[in-house]
Amino acid sequence: MNRIEIQQYRANNDFKISETKTYEDFGKSEKILKKELSVIRRELGEFQDTIYAHGKYSILVCLQGMDTAGKDSLIREIFKDFNVSGVEVHSFKVPTELELSHNYLWRHYLVLPAKGKFGVFNRTHYENVLVTRVHPEYILNEHIPGIHNVEDIDQKFWDKRFEQINDFERHLAENGTLIFKFFLNLSKEEQRQRLLRRLALKEKHWKFSPGDLKERELWQTYQNCYEEAISKTTNDYAPWFVVPADNKKATRIIIASILLQSLKKYKDIKEPMLSDKILANLGTYEEQLQREK
């Protein structure tokens, strides 16, 4: 697999969804793409061991996308070769009563990855400027001072949230968290086909909800909200990558490659060296173990 040109997927502050691709296959068959992913993820898994031993960076991988974008299967396939103790996955659904009694970022702070570990957010803190923006009535459940009805939630409110999220991510980055944010760019037609498969296959029925169709009716509203959220929160310390999602195998290769290539640029990430004293006595330690025979 040739190196992925990372910059072609990186969003800028003038990001337009209509100008981005939803499909990629690199001119290769699914069989070849699957084989190439296995090579990349194995190397990524090996580098995870180095990151864990180094113990000075934590890695936060944020995944956002419309329903059926393939987030669950992507996580399974990309992190298959990881040491399970080095990666934690968290999915953020409707906030609980306890979570709503705190600020909207609280539940995300609680599960941030420790140094040396990967954390994967399957849906993220961006739900607070996406779902709640499409359905602003949800904001009322947060009991925010000065917000009494939907009419109080204006553009200034959302701009403030973007600012707060940028501050949140800047704080994490300045303290050793490497942040990667991925928007899985799915076409409306591909989503339709995936929803139809859920209805056609009995083993997929559990994934379907009539609510999926209601949200689908708001497709363009979601696209507009994603566009603004990504444009206002893509930064050098927490970049957004917009990845075509209609072909799952290519999507996985792109994201795994971005992670591997980006992390490899940190030349300070390496296994810690043993002290001179221990190095000088390696032979002694080996003799001690050999005598146990």
Image (cartoon, rainbow, N blue to C red):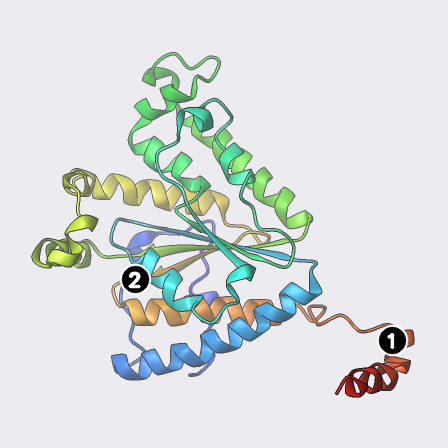
Q: Is residue 71 above or below residue 292?
A: above
Residue tagged 1: 278
Instruction: In the displayed orientation, state which residue is furthest to the front.
Output: 293
Q: What residue is rendered at 32% in x and 61% in y?
A: 73
**Image check: 115 left or right of 98?**
right
**Image check: 95 left or right of 263?**
left
Image coordinates of residue 240 in percent, x first then y, are 47, 54
Mark 2: amino acid: Ala
- Find out whether the residues at labels 2 and 1 contact each other: C-beta distance under 8 Å: no
Q: Quadrant of the N terminus?
A: bottom left
Badge 2 or badge 1: first in the primary sequence:
2
Which type of secondary structure does the marked residue at label 2 adopt? loop
Callout 1 crowding tier (Cα within 10 Å): few <14, some 14–19, many ≥20: few
Image coordinates of residue 255 in percent, x first then y, are 43, 66
* Quarter where residue 153 is shown: top left
* Residue 156 in view in this figure: no
Residue tagged 2: 245
Q: How many marks?
A: 2
**Foreground: 157 or 1?**
1
**Foreground: 249 or 228?**
249
Mark 1: amino acid: Ile
Q: Disc 2 and disc 1: Cα gap in Å?
A: 50 Å
Q: What residue is rendered at 57% in x and 50% in y?
A: 113
Image coordinates of residue 114 in percent, x first then y, are 62, 51
Image coordinates of residue 276 in percent, x first then y, are 90, 76
Q: What residue is rendered at 36% in x and 82% in y?
A: 35
